[in-house]
Image (spheres, rainbow, N blue to C red):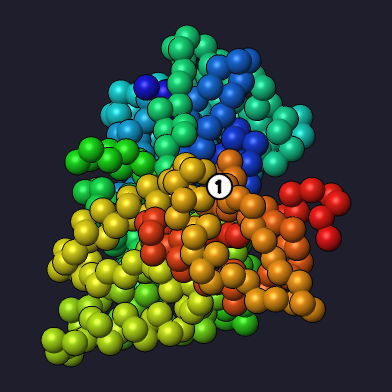
């Protein structure tokens, strides 16, 4: 198991900036407003050849009227419980606050190794100000500036001395299943329901999740990473800078995933923004499963599922070979079926068809229904093979590849889908000339 280091502290002391500095990334959203980081999320860091995991957390607060603050505090407490080492970040500009004292008390009771980090020491004149933090009983403060990076080397030198010699990332190479969709369709609730723990904060307010949350799912013979994302809105609705960056995180999560569990609201149907998200998934050649959530709120008859599915297919055409599952996360209705279908989509995405089997099937079809002639010339396909790519792609070697039109390509794609299970997976067909002299 890797060593987990949690960065904790009250709001707006620079925890996310330090997280980005340690992980050499921009995973955590950084903004001058307090309470930006709501969920805890993870990254990896390396120093002097030693690797460790890092958790960024929301600011620890008490007595606030903010609907999120109680949840944020609970998320911080979970992170403290998960972590092996704690980085307690304080602000040298403001000195010791009541919240710092409360946090220090929590950390002392944890029994974990704590490094006291006096942040915002942007010049040598501020170093003496850090002496105030000695009274919290957590040892010598490490004076640093998470923005510039000054002072982080000394902290990391001492931190890695606490690490075991061996490190391995047990999640490396695992499939990534991203839960995507517009805000407030139930993405975080689905993640919490599947994992059995409240990794993501859930409230009735849209836009609660701002960062991308990773959680390993290892149950019932499955082993993969579930990714909860912020909801993707249209650009003209992205008014806050924070929300804009959250959208970027969601897009990046789609790009880095293997399969997208694409959630829509049953009552809202599939609208223009949903189609934009679906198009993004398709363009990135990701596997996709459509989850129609809040199905319990719909008035239904015996043909409702069929009619709704046909409506979805009409809107996502021509890529209609996509599994659709109707769920109610609130009532725990068919959520595990959704997961099973997502696993099947992943298996479809990595499926490899033998060249001999592919040719034995597709060449007779093309002989019976050949490509249309162009200018009196006939397209003759010599053989077909699946390319050694991460996603299903097929190369058709022929004499006149430039004369194969899009409708015929779709015809061949449909024939391939009829025989081989590529449900939920975009596939690409390429026509290439076997010899340079072919004309």
Q: Is residue 37 left or right of residue 399?
A: left
The residue sitting at 69% across, 66% down in the picture is 379
Residue pictured at 63% horizontal, 15% vertical? 48
Is 47 in front, or is 111?
47
Where, quadrant-wise, is the C terminus in this rendering?
A: bottom right
Residue 120 or residue 56, whichever sits in front: 56
Quick one: label 1, few (<14), some, or many (20+) residues within 10 Å?
A: some
Where residue 322 sits: x, y (%)? 39, 68
* In this picture, residue 14 sits left or right of residue 98: right
Dot 1 lies on which element?
A: strand
Q: Is residue 42 left or right of residue 367?
A: left
Against 275, residue 127 (above or below) is above
State the residue in front, 69 or 37. Answer: 37
The residue located at (65%, 27%) in the rendering is 152
Q: Residue furthest top?
A: 165
- Determine if residue 418 is in view: yes
Residue under numbered circle 1? 386
In the image, farthest residue toward the right: 437
Question: Which residue is more in the foreground, 14 or 432?
Answer: 432
> Where does the image place residue 358, in percent across and percent down from the top left?
48, 50
Q: Is residue 185 above or below residue 119?
A: below
Quadrant for the N terminus in the image: top left
The picture places residue 398, in percent across and down from the top left corner, at 69, 56
Residue at left offset 59%, top offset 64%:
283
């Amino acid at each position: 198991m890797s060593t987990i280091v949690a960065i904790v502290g009250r709001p707006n002391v620079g925890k996310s900036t330090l997280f980005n500095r340690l992980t050499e990334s921009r995973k955590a959203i950084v903004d001058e407003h307090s309470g930006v980081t709501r969920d805890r999320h993870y990254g990896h860091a390396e120093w002097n050849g030693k690797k460790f995991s890092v958790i960024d957390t929301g600011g620890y607060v008490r007595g606030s009227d903010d609907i999120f603050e109680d949840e944020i505090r609970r998320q911080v407490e979970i992170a403290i419980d998960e972590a092996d080492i704690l980085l307690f970040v304080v602000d040298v500009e403001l000195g010791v606050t009541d919240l710092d004292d409360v946090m220090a008390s929590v950390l002392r009771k944890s029994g974990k190794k704590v490094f006291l980090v006096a942040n915002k020491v942007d010049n040598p004149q501020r170093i003496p100000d850090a002496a105030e933090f000695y009274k919290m009983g957590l040892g010598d403060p490490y004076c640093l500036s998470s923005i510039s990076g000054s002072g982080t080397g000394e902290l990391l030198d001492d931190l890695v001395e606490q690490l075991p010699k061996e490190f391995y990332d047990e999640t490396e190479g695992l499939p990534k299943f991203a839960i995507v969709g517009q805000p407030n369709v139930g993405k975080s609730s689905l993640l919490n329901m599947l994992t059995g723990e409240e990794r993501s904060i859930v409230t009735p307010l849209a836009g609660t999740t701002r960062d991308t949350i990773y959680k390993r799912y290892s149950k019932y013979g499955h082993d993969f990473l579930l990714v909860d994302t912020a909801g993707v809105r249209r650009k003209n609705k992205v008014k806050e800078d924070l929300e804009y960056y959250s959208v970027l995180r969601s897009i990046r999560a789609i790009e880095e995933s293997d399969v997208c569990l694409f959630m829509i609201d049953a009552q809202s149907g599939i609208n223009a923004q949903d189609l934009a998200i679906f198009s993004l998934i398709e363009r990135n050649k990701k596997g996709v499963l459509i989850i129609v959530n809040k199905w319990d709120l719909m008035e239904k008859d015996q043909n409702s599922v069929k009619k709704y599915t046909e409506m979805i297919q009409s809107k996502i055409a021509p890529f209609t070979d996509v599994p659709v599952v109707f769920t109610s996360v609130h009532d725990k209705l068919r959520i595990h079926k959704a997961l099973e279908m997502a696993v099947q989509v992943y298996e479809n995405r990595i499926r490899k068809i033998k060249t001999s089997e592919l040719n034995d099937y597709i060449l007779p079809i093309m002989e019976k229904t050949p490509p249309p002639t162009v200018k009196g010339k006939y397209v003759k396909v010599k053989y077909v093979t699946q390319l050694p790519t991460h996603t299903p792609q097929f190369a058709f070697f022929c004499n006149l590849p430039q004369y194969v039109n899009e409708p015929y390509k779709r015809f061949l794609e449909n024939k391939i889908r009829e025989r081989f299970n590529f449900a939920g997976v975009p596939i690409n067909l390429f026509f290439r000339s076997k010899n340079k002299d072919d004309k």
